[in-house]
Image: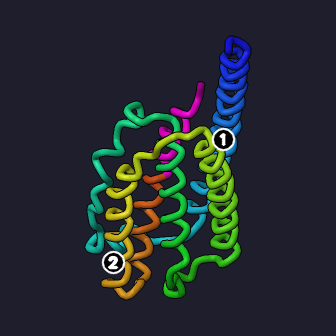
Amino acid sequence: MAKCIVRVAVLLCFSTAALSLSYNLLRFQQSDTNLACQELLRQLNGTPQYCLDDRVDFQFPEEMIQPQEFRKQDAVLVIHEMLQQIFQIFRKNFSSTSWNETIVENLYMELSQQVDRLRTALEEIAKENFTWRRAATLPLKRYYLKIVRYLKAKSYSRCAWTVVRGEIRSNFFFLNNLTDYLQN
């Protein structure tokens, strides 16, 4: 019996250490991706002063503002959800923007790679018998739905995309803070 308890304790120590290393690696990868995405979004041309009348406060969910209140596992889930939603938004009709398609493709690639990494991390976390607080992502889904509805209501106009691009850029500032929270 004592041997069994010792084995379980050793296994738990190793799995906790491995997960800790995964958080550090994930934080490093996510930080790089955030910076790359911010730079790509900056490179997409837009005329904000021309679109002042189109501005909207999409009201980023208040529940997300304090990442210190998240468990690291929930932070990974929130980051994954945000990047997945951002990826889907940029898959919409942006033909009216005259954006450089190479930049947009690079943005897709960065987002897609990180979503895949996060999916793998979520699978590892699930193996630890972790129970998710899926309700944490519901306010995010509503928030991104507002953005999609706004684009649709504005017929995916150049100004609507300029406003959305600015909103998504601010999302990456939040993602930077949340990513820093993954540090051990």
For residue 97, side relative to residue 163 (left or right):
right
Q: Provide the residue span drawn in magenta.
A: 172-184
**Secondary structure state at the residue bearing disc 1:** helix
Q: Quadrant of the C terminus?
A: top right
Residue 151 located left or right of residue 35: left
The residue nearer to you, when weighing 99 against 90, is 90
Question: Residue at the spot x=59%, y=29% of the render?
Answer: 183
Does residue 53 appear left or right of residue 11 in this picture?
left
Q: Position of residue 116 (x, y in %)?
A: 67, 58
Dot 2 amino acid type: Arg
Q: Earlier in the sequence, mark 2 or mark 1?
A: 1
Pointer 2 residue:
149
Q: Which residue is depicted at the point 68% across and 21% down? A: 13
Q: Is residue 181 magenta?
A: yes
Instruction: Specify whether residue 98 is painted magenta.
Output: no
Q: Which residue is mark 1?
A: 26
Disc 1 residue type?
A: Leu
Which of 87 and 1 lies nearest the eye of the viewer? 1
Work out which quarter of the rendered image holds the N terminus and state it. Answer: top right
